[in-house]
């Protein structure tokens, strides 16, 4: 078989210019010249070209390829040399990646007060926002592992977005229609003629999970029947995690799903209300398995992970980011279904976000479905939790941006303190009074330290003493001054005396107050000072509660980085 230069070039997927160049340097000579003076190639030429292209694919230099083609050196010898060179190059690249990851894992200096508060609250998280990555704390404290772009973590309920994504891919393939009623796929479902696939995707099916919720509550009651008073976050949640939660994280069988969804009538007419229930995603996963004949993990791998080169994403497998309840690591078994189970990385999750935003893998109809029906035409935040790992994924389809936030422990200060930050803005004479106001019945609060900082989080003064402020209310709810007679419920200081000539009544100072408090009982802890001849006051509820730790951390950030700065700017303008 004779082939001209254009034919062999087309067969090999290279340009005519490349074939001619190989001829010029002696790598690929034509088999001969025909009567018209055109060069032609034959089957042996094709085999030679295959060898050349293989060598080029592994980045073998042309000089080495010439030696191999000329049989000056056996190809296996050259391949071994090339392998050693590539192995060294790989080690060098891995070192560079590791150095970059180590740099990225170190906290970025955002603001002095932000850095201080994240340190005070033992904040442990990472944020990946399109073009940047920064982290605080550790991914794994036991093994001293930092957060990295390729740290694997459980995505929890965010898995449902991938299930919806696959449903839209399958619709494009003609395997299903999102307007189909469920009785087409689940004949035994009593209300299958009323609920559509689209309702599952938008959490508007009205399907109840009451049976599953009742079983969960029964399991808790049984576990804590002997010590219900200890059912709190610190003691109780750890026990739940270890003994109960794994049983409820297992993938439900088809019969279990049917038992749950047939247990109660629909809560509302499908499509008329929003009601987030994991059962919707689990049913959608079962439908995907039915129409494809594959398990959900294989579906995701074939239709999402491999096409998007999400090489570190899977169901099952090890995780790098360990969740902590208080300071105790909580390791969870991650079963897989349509509602949970993906283990991924910030880098891989970012690839999926980009694919969704850019309309890859799904049709324009699928992309618009996400934007209008799933995300409701606005920036959408999806929350996930698996064990003690919390995830927030925010996507703005219109702006083309995404943000990934992962926290593996609640931000609780040392010694379970309640840390509050009081802005003291334009204090006339320097006088500041800290005092306990209204207290709930059976509440107790003790302040052991008060520190004064400037606007840049530089410490200017501190006073520490056990019981600097102390009040305990054994009666009904009331103001501390109504029953504390020795004055221990307040503490006074004068910044003018403390800072002397450095005191400036035009600037803003911040007081950090650390308190030990009752659990679940609050006492108002306030600060007052004069500003432009008028008394200014600000109070925080001083209480200790693990469930609210993240809210308290956000409150601290806002009180310093937002509220105080805004008020100072207003003062400057006036």
Image (cartoon, helix red, strand yellow):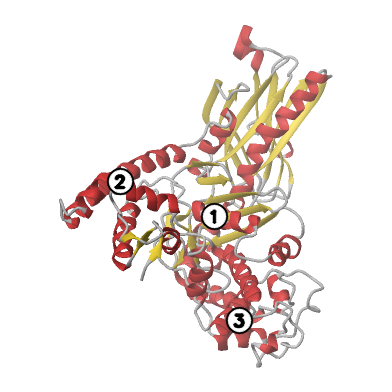
Q: Residue furthest bottom?
A: 188
Q: Which mark is nearer the camera, 1 or 2? A: 2
| Mark 3 or mark 2, earlier in chain | 2
In the image, residue 326 sits, relative to residue 10, either above or below, namely: above
Q: Secondary structure at mark 1?
A: helix
Q: Quadrant of residue 5?
A: bottom left
Q: Residues within 10 Å of mark 2 (few under 14, many from 20)?
A: few
In the image, residue 97 sits, relative to residue 492, either above or below, namely: below
- Residue at label 3? 287
Q: On the rendered image, what quadrant is the N terminus found in?
A: bottom left
**Mark 1 vs mark 3, CA separation in Å:** 26 Å
Residue in front for this viewpoint, 124 or 162: 162
In this rendering, does residue 226 appear at all?
A: no
In the picture provided, is 572 more to the left or to the right than 503?
A: right
Q: Which mark is nearer the camera, 3 or 2? A: 2
Which of the numbered marks, if any, corresponds to residue 351? 1
In the image, residue 501 sits, relative to residue 519, either above or below, namely: above
Residue in front for this viewpoint, 155 or 116: 155
- Residue at label 2? 25
User: At 63% from the left edge and 82% from the top edge, which residue is drawn?
Assistant: 211
Residue in front for this viewpoint, 556 or 319: 319
Residue 398 point in image, percent of width and height: 73, 51
| Mark 1 or mark 2, earlier in chain | 2
Which of the numbered marks, if any, corresponds to residue 156? none
Q: Quadrant of residue 156?
A: bottom right
User: At 76% from the left edge and 30% from the top edge, which residue is drawn?
Assistant: 537
User: At 32% from the left edge and 61% from the top edge, which residue is drawn?
Assistant: 50
In the image, residue 4 sits, relative to residue 82, either above or below, namely: below
**Mark 1 vs mark 2, CA separation in Å:** 42 Å
Residue 126 point in image, percent of width and height: 52, 46
In this rendering, does residue 107 appear at all?
A: yes
């Amino acid at each position: 078989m004779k082939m001209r230069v254009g034919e062999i070039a087309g067969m090999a997927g290279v340009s005519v210019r490349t074939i001619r160049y190989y001829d010029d340097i002696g790598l690929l000579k034509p088999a001969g010249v025909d009567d018209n003076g055109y060069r032609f190639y034959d089957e042996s030429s094709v085999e030679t070209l295959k060898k050349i292209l293989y060598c080029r694919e592994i980045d073998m230099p042309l000089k080495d390829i010439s030696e191999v083609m000329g049989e000056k050196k056996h190809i296996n010898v050259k391949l071994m040399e090339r392998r050693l060179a590539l192995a060294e190059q790989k080690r060098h690249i891995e070192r560079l990646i590791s150095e970059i990851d180590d740099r990225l894992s170190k906290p970025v200096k955002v603001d002095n007060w932000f850095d201080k508060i994240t340190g005070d609250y033992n904040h442990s998280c990472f944020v990946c926002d399109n073009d940047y990555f920064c982290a605080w704390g550790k991914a794994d404290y036991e093994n001293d592992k930092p957060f990295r772009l390729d740290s694997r973590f459980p995505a929890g309920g965010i898995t449902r977005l991938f299930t919806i994504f696959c449903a839209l891919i399958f619709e494009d393939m003609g395997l299903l229609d999102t307007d189909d009623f469920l009785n087409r796929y689940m004949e035994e479902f009593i209300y299958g003629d009323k609920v559509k696939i689209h309702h599952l995707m938008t959490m508007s099916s009205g399907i109840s999970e009451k049976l599953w919720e009742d079983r969960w509550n029964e399991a808790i009651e049984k576990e804590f029947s002997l010590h219900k008073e200890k059912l709190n976050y610190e003691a109780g949640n750890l026990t739940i995690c270890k003994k109960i939660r794994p049983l409820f994280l297992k993938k439900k069988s088809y019969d279990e799903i049917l038992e749950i969804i047939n247990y109660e009538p629909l809560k509302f007419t499908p499509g008329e209300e929003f009601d987030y229930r994991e059962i919707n995603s689990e049913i959608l996963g079962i439908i995907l398995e039915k129409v494809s004949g594959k398990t959900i993990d294989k579906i995701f791998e074939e239709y999402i992970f491999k096409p998007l080169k999400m090489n570190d994403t899977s169901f099952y497998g090890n995780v790098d980011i360990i969740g902590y309840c208080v300071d105790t690591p909580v390791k969870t078994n991650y079963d897989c279904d349509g509602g949970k189970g993906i283990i991924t990385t910030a880098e891989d999750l970012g690839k999926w976000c980009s694919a969704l935003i850019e309309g890859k893998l799904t049709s324009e109809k699928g992309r618009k479905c996400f934007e209008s029906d799933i995300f409701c035409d606005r920036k959408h935040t999806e929350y996930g939790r698996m064990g003690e790992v919390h995830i927030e994924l925010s996507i703005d389809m219109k702006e083309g941006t995404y943000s990934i936030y992962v926290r593996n422990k609640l931000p609780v200060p040392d010694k379970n303190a309640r840390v509050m930050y009081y802005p003291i803005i334009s204090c006339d004479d320097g006088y500041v009074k800290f005092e306990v106001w209204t207290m709930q019945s059976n509440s107790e609060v003790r302040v052991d330290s008060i520190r004064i900082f400037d606007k840049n989080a530089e410490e200017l003064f501190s006073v520490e003493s056990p019981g600097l402020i102390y009040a305990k209310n054994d009666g009904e709810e009331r103001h501390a001054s109504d029953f504390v007679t020795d004055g221990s419920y307040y503490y006074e200081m004068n910044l003018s005396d403390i800072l002397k000539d450095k005191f400036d009544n035009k600037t803003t100072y911040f007081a950090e107050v650390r308190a030990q408090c009752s659990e679940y009982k609050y006492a108002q802890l306030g600060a007052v000072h004069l500003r432009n001849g008028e008394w200014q006051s600000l109070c925080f509820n001083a209480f200790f509660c693990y469930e609210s730790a993240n809210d308290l951390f956000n409150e601290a950030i806002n009180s310093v980085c937002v509220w105080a700065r805004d008020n100072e700017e207003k003062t400057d303008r006036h």
